[in-house]
Image (cartoon, helix red, strand yellow):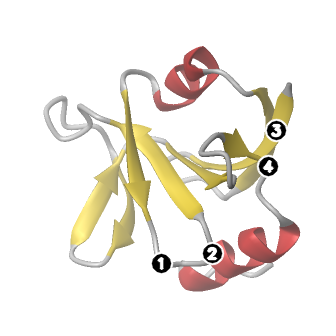
Amino acid sequence: MKIKVLFKAPNKNFEEVEITNTLEDMQKLVDGYIEVIPTDIYDKVFMIVNEEGKLYELEPNIHYYRDIILGNVVFVRIGNNGEWSSISDKQIAAIKKYFGMKY
């Protein structure tokens, strides 16, 4: 099953991407093991990042609260069943607004 996610690489703009809803595809996007970070940006939006980003000193990407997220970031929605699901246009707009991007 395909889902729509919001992808952000360091020094690049946000990009809407359609991926297969698998752990392997998430790992490919973040180039390694994943870490799931809950956010308060919008209802049920989570960040998927490289779990070892700081260990491997990946390139800085975004600031979230008092932390700097390194490497690629995938924004995804967690559905009521606990599985990843497509991110909505409202969620995309809220994420871009939060990080100061035009939408």
Gap between marks 1 and 4 measured at Cα = 17 Å
Q: Is residue 103 above or below residue 58?
A: below
Tell me the kind of residue under disc 2.
Asp
Gap between marks 2 and 3 measured at Cα = 17 Å
Q: Secondary structure at mark 3?
A: strand
Q: Is residue 94 above or below residue 76?
A: below
Tell me which corner region of the image, top left, top right, bottom left or bottom right, holds residue 36: top left
Which label sits on residue 43? 2
Residue under the point 64% across and 40% down: 83
Contact between labelled residues 2 and 1, with CB atoms less than 8 Å apart: no
Per the image, the residue denoted by label 4 is: 86
Residue 96: x and y in percent read 66, 75
Q: Is residue 87 left or right of residue 77?
A: right
Contact between labelled residues 4 and 3, with CB atoms less than 8 Å apart: yes
Mark 2 or mark 3: name the one nearer the start of the chain.
Answer: 3
Mark 3 or mark 4: name the one nearer the start of the chain.
Answer: 3
Contact between labelled residues 4 and 1, with CB atoms less than 8 Å apart: no
Give the position of the C terminus as an image quadrant: bottom right
Q: Is residue 26 left or right of residue 40?
A: right
Q: Secondary structure at mark 1?
A: loop
Per the image, the residue denoted by label 1 is: 40
- Mark 1 neighbour class, 10 Å CA radius: few under 14, some 14 to 19, many 20 or more: few
